[in-house]
Image (cartoon, rainbow, N blue to C red):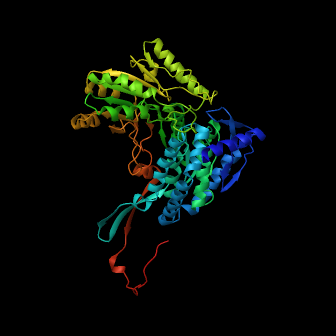
Amino acid sequence: MMAMSQRRTLASAAATGAPTKIKSLVNGELFESASTQWIPVHDPATQEVVSLVPESTPEELEAATRSASEAFKSWSKTSVLTRQQVMFNLAALVRRDTDKIAAMITREQGKTLPDARGDVFRGLQVVEHAASMPTLQMGEHLPVGTDIDTYTIRAPLGVTAGIAPFNFPAMIPLWMFPMATAVGNTMVFKPSERVPSAALHLAALAQEAGLPKGALNIVHGTHNTVNYLCDAPAIRAISFVGGDRAGKHIFARGTANGKRVQANLGAKNHGVVLPDCNVNTTLNSIVGAAFGAAGQRCMALPAVLFVGAAEKLIPELIERTKALKVNGGFEENTDVGPMISPQAVARAEKIIADSVAMGAKVVLDGRGLKVPKYPKGNFLGPTILTNVTTDMPCYKEEIFGPVLITMRSESLEDAIELINANPYGNGTAVFTNSGSAARKFSMDIDVGQIGINLGIPVPIPSFAFTGSRGSIAGDINFYGKSGVQFFTQIKTVTASWKSEDAVGSKAAVVMPTLK
């Protein structure tokens, strides 16, 4: 009811005046940009312009960086216990506002409301893990000689930048700024210009939680803003999640300017189905992983290899996919919502058509789907292709839509060889009841994240998001211990304090407290 009420409120606002202008956040102050260039934010289900997001001006970008630089001077000196408490507070506030944030996501991104709540929850888990910083940020210590000790300090870098994609408006920002600030950095953050509201609200919650002014600044825009973040001398590191083209550009330009960069790029995740799999679990997992979030996940499962007799499961896979309900994200019982834009739908449909022209067969066709209540929505119904070969566009390209390609393999070894020949290494999954087959797959596959009887094997934050090969530029992964490593630098101290210089003093009898 709350989500529907928000949609009605926005519709009323749109009927009475211009769309809302999205604010920027610099030095703790929300303000309307002085920009003359504003980008419309569309509701993917209706095409309604729900808000306008600015191209931040050069002066605003510089002000954000100055604010972050100034805030770093004091924030980096706070104790790890102080920063931990901010993360505790932030986790409680995100949990409190989950439904509000989820409604923002569904309105701007289109995913179903339950999936939007999951988006928030997976980000919340990273915030909760960031509250473990007193352990995560520990250095090492070793006595190396008489009265000589060597120890390491994980020190913050300084000002960092985050650049997020459209498909996870809450989770990806929460991958970035909590880990960055919990270790003592500050951040200039750019949400996707298509889905700005969730990130801006999360930044407001961070300030409510106790993050000081300037520690987190929100700027907006497209190419010029990205290039500024890559070039600004004060910015020491950039965390990016998105597509290949942007990620490779950011990695090249950022590293050329001496910055540390982690860039999560494209993916082509494969599932492998063996004949001995649990049929019900396997088919449900594939359908959910392939078509959830309209396929707009970097860990979606858009390609499935059926080994040997397992191909007999394809007809049942088609039937289960037909049962999915396509509708607006706010509607109850919706399984698949709209895609992000008409251009995204057109691109996916072109990839399908080009692959059919090369011999692929459409066994379930979602093209041209119209949802009566949302006739202008960016809908592509779940689509399944067979007779796919590795030279077809539907295999070579990341479709990023509700399209599943099926392929056949003679053996597990052949399936592993095919997957390892693909340039991407984000995720993969095997479905089997054989522990030996599962172990062989996990040991021989050259992919960073492996699911065994799980379609979307995204690790919990105490591990790390470990996409590999063509799916990442940079050598340090996201969140978990890797996240701490990315956002800190090692200082090694060797100290000599002579024991003969020790002087006794009166004992302290009061319990010590740390602040």
Pick the front one: 32 or 118: 118
Which residue: 46% across, 52% down? 125
Q: Where is residue 339 drawn, in percent x and y?
A: 56, 31
Depicted 481 relative to depicted 43: above or below:
below
Depicted 467 relative to depicted 396: above or below:
below
Kindly indicate the quadrant of the structure image that contains residue 454: top left
Which residue: 21% across, 36% down? 436
Kindly indicate the quadrant of the structure image that contains residue 278: top left
Pick the front one: 370 or 354: 370
Pick the front one: 227 or 150: 227
The answer to whether residue 38 is left or right of residue 71 is: right
Q: Where is residue 147 drawn, in percent x and y?
A: 32, 71
Depicted 505 relative to depicted 451: above or below:
below
Q: Is residue 26 visible?
A: yes
The answer to whether residue 296 is left or right of residue 303 is: right
Q: Where is residue 329 drawn, in percent x and y?
A: 56, 37
Residue at the right extreme?
Answer: 16
Q: Where is residue 227 drawn, in percent x and y?
A: 61, 39
The answer to whether residue 293 is left or right of residue 23 is: left
Q: Is residue 422 visible?
A: no
Residue at the bottom extreme?
Answer: 506
Kindly indicate the quadrant of the structure image that contains residue 368: top right
Which residue: 38% across, 67% down? 495
Which residue: 40% across, 47% down? 464
Give the mark count. Answer: 0
Depicted 242 relative to depicted 88: above or below:
above
